[in-house]
Amino acid sequence: MTLPETMRAIEITRPGGPDVLQETRRPVPNEAPGQVVIKVAYAGVNRPDALQRAGAYAPPPTASDLPGLEVSGEVVAAGHGAETLLGRQVCALTPGGGYAEYVVCSVSHCLPIPDGLSLDQAAALPETYFTVWSNVVMRGGLIPGERFLVHGGSSGIGTTAIQIANKLGARVWATAGSAAKCQACADLGATAINYREEDFVDVMKASGGANLILDMVGGDYIPRNIRALAMEGRLVQIAFLSGPKVELNFAQMMMRRLTLTGSTLRPQSDLAKAEIARQLRTHVWPWLATGQIGPVMDSEFALADAAKAHAHMEAGDHIGKIVLKVA
């Protein structure tokens, strides 16, 4: 298949708000050994994209400067060692560049589209499922019967974490900020906590404390999370929507044998991401293929309307995932 020389893409013209996202033309990327080129059907929209747009999350040195960390589409070119995927439809975790008609990524970060899922749903999987599985299971060590709390329960991360934790046999709580968002969490199997009406610390303490908390808020949530943890509880931090700096009494960590940890996905090695992909394909993809879990979809925007998609995400009214229709 002969690929065009250039493609439509969305670039970040300067650090700033959604309006700095503008359509442009870029050269179609070339694959190296172990890589594939995907003709993008849909691209997921995620918080890290907005952070990069604002100038707060620089891409790795070898990655595209274009935003976009997850896509679905067809493999149209393959380097040495990746030929078996040529012509197949996949979803993939990308190091960047997903807001474009073509993107290059490692073959080991591609996954088949689960049976029954559409291309738009498939584009909503990689960034979220890689993040949740690696932090809740691989890092957080969630096991059956434990009490699990996720903040931002109606977000893409939250709706995914609720479902995976339920499948693992945990008891799940989720915070959200409106009746509609709380209902969405409850529909997925979580005990919903409206943080505008209840203190999640009190709720979790009354339930015995959380064994594991997944937090993307930070700020004053950090000391409150510490108070909400059970003895030997774990806090996994994956973002800081309210800031990363806070005064904290670490004596609580010692006295109650707590574990405080966290991670970001994008800077991890190709090998580490390949292992996450392997575990997802083994443990989670069968649940998706049989409809036991699935992405919660909020809305779809055209590629040219990426700025509107970012504005919608940052308004905070969405429930589930936002995607861009590329092809």
Image: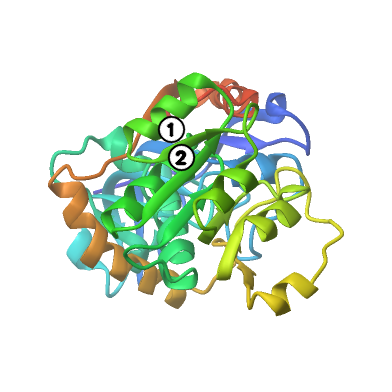
- Give the crowd class for mark 1: few <14, some 14-19, many >=20 residues within 10 Å: many
Q: What residue sits 58% from the left and 52% below the top? A: 205
Question: Residue shown at 33%/37% (left/top)?
Answer: 188
The x, y position of residue 209, in whole percent, is 54, 58
* Left or right: residue 174 compared with residue 284: right
Quadrant the C terminus occupies: top left
Counting residues from the start of the chain, the first of labels 2 and 1 encountered is: 2
Tag 2, which secondary structure?
A: helix
Which circle marks residue 143 in the picture? none
Dot 1: element = loop
Q: Nearer the viewer, residue 24 or 240?
A: 240
Say which residue appears at 73% left-offset and 35% top-offset. Answer: 13
Q: Label 1 sits on what residue type? A: Gly
Above or below: residue 36 compared with residue 149 = below
Q: Is residue 29 left or right of residue 316?
A: left
Q: Position of residue 283 (x, y in %)?
A: 24, 64
Q: Residue placed at 35% from the left, 41% from the top?
A: 123
User: Which of 30/13 is in front?
Assistant: 13
Q: CA distance from mark 2 to mark 1?
A: 4 Å
**From this viewpoint, is residue 326 visible?**
no
Residue sitting farthest toward the front: 206
Which three-letter amino acid code belongs to the residue tagged 2?
Gly
- Image quarter for residue 93? bottom left
Return the residue at label 2.
156
Image spot of residue 85 (x, y percent): 21, 60
For residue 324, above or below residue 125: above
The answer to whether residue 131 is visible is yes
Name the spot of residue 242 as percent of width and height, x first: 75, 43
Task: State if disc 1 and disc 2 touch (CB < 8 Å).
Answer: yes
**Which residue occupies the foreground of this view, 231 or 235?**
231
Disc 1 target residue: 320
